[in-house]
Image (cartoon, helix red, strand yellow):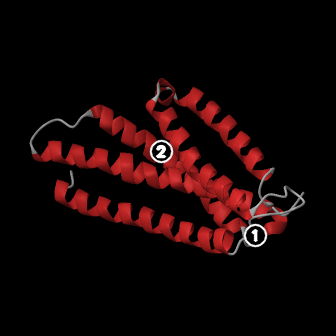
């Protein structure tokens, strides 16, 4: 049995705000713990950089990672899941390595997680839900929904599902540094 478009739209509204509030609370904690507090952001044994430069690196990793992901998804690469996966994996490893040479281990770890979280919330707010709104509007008008929108929303939703595991692991890992970022 099909759900009525109004019910679907109301349900999707909650998904949007769940993603948004999770991201906003995470960014607020990132700002308070790392950018304002500052002590956890830099480790002189890793790299002796200024607090401002460390903040710039952190913010750049989060937003540049999301930008690069979106460009890759819009390119022909985004239509080939296997090649996209390999390229994305290599980029994630490269970014993780680079940020671990600049920030404290704890800050590097959490910034990679914040990059993933930013990608996930951007997928929800900018791609999945707008596509679903357009498909619901088409159904209300008695038209066939655009299958390309459905395909892209499905792919980004699937990628969000895969990203959820490392994001949750990274969030929890701050309570267990000995087995994650705190171990050589």
Residue 41 makes an appearance in the image? yes
Instruction: Determine the secondary structure under disc 2.
Output: helix
Residue at image coords 33%, 51%: 129
Measured from the top left, where is residue 43 in percent x and y?
A: 83, 63
Residue at image coords 34%, 65%: 14
In the drawing, does residue 75 fall left or right of residue 178?
Answer: left
Measured from the top left, where is residue 10 in percent x and y?
A: 25, 63
Measured from the top left, where is residue 160 in percent x and y?
A: 50, 49
Numbered label attached to residue 153: none
Q: Disc 1 to disc 2, how far (Cα)?
A: 33 Å
Residue at image coords 50%, 64%: 23
Mark 1, other Cα within 10 Å: few <14 / some 14–19 / many ≥20: some
* Quadrant housing the C terminus: bottom right
Residue at image coords 69%, 35%: 90
Mark 2, other Cα within 10 Å: few <14 / some 14–19 / many ≥20: few
Query: In front here: 6 or 75?
Result: 75
Measured from the top left, where is residue 69 in percent x and y?
A: 53, 40
Residue 6 sits in which quadrant?
A: bottom left
Number of callouts: 2
N-terminal label among 1 and 2: 1
* Outermost residue to the left: 141
Residue 155 sits in which quadrant?
A: top left
Query: In front here: 165 or 45?
Result: 45
Which residue is under mark 2? Answer: 158
Seen in the picture, residue 73 relative to 99 is either above or below; the reply is above
In the drawing, does residue 119 fall left or right of residue 89?
Answer: left
Residue 95 sits in which quadrant?
A: top right
Seen in the picture, residue 17 relative to 67 is either above or below; the reply is below
Seen in the picture, residue 169 relative to 79 is either above or below; the reply is below
Instruction: Determine the secondary structure under disc 1.
Output: loop
Which residue is under mark 1? Answer: 40
């Amino acid at each position: 049995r099909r759900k009525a478009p109004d019910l679907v739209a109301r349900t999707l509204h909650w998904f949007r705000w769940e993603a948004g509030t999770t991201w906003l609370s995470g960014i607020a904690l990132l700002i308070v713990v790392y950018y304002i507090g500052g002590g956890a952001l830099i480790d002189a044994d890793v790299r002796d950089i200024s607090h401002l430069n460390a903040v710039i690196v952190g913010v750049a990793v989060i937003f540049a990672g999301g930008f690069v992901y979106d460009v890759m998804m819009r390119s022909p690469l985004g239509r080939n899941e296997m090649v996209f996966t390999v390229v994305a994996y290599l980029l994630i490893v490269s970014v993780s390595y680079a940020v671990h040479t600049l920030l404290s281990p704890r800050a590097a770890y959490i910034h990679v997680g914040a990059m993933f979280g930013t990608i996930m919330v951007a997928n929800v707010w900018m791609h999945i839900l707008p596509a679903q709104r357009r498909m619901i509007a088409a159904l209300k008008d008695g038209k066939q929904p655009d299958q390309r929108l459905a395909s892209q929303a499905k792919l980004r939703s699937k990628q969000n599902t895969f990203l959820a595991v490392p994001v949750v692991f990274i969030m929890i890992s701050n309570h267990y540094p000995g087995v994650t970022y705190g171990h050589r």
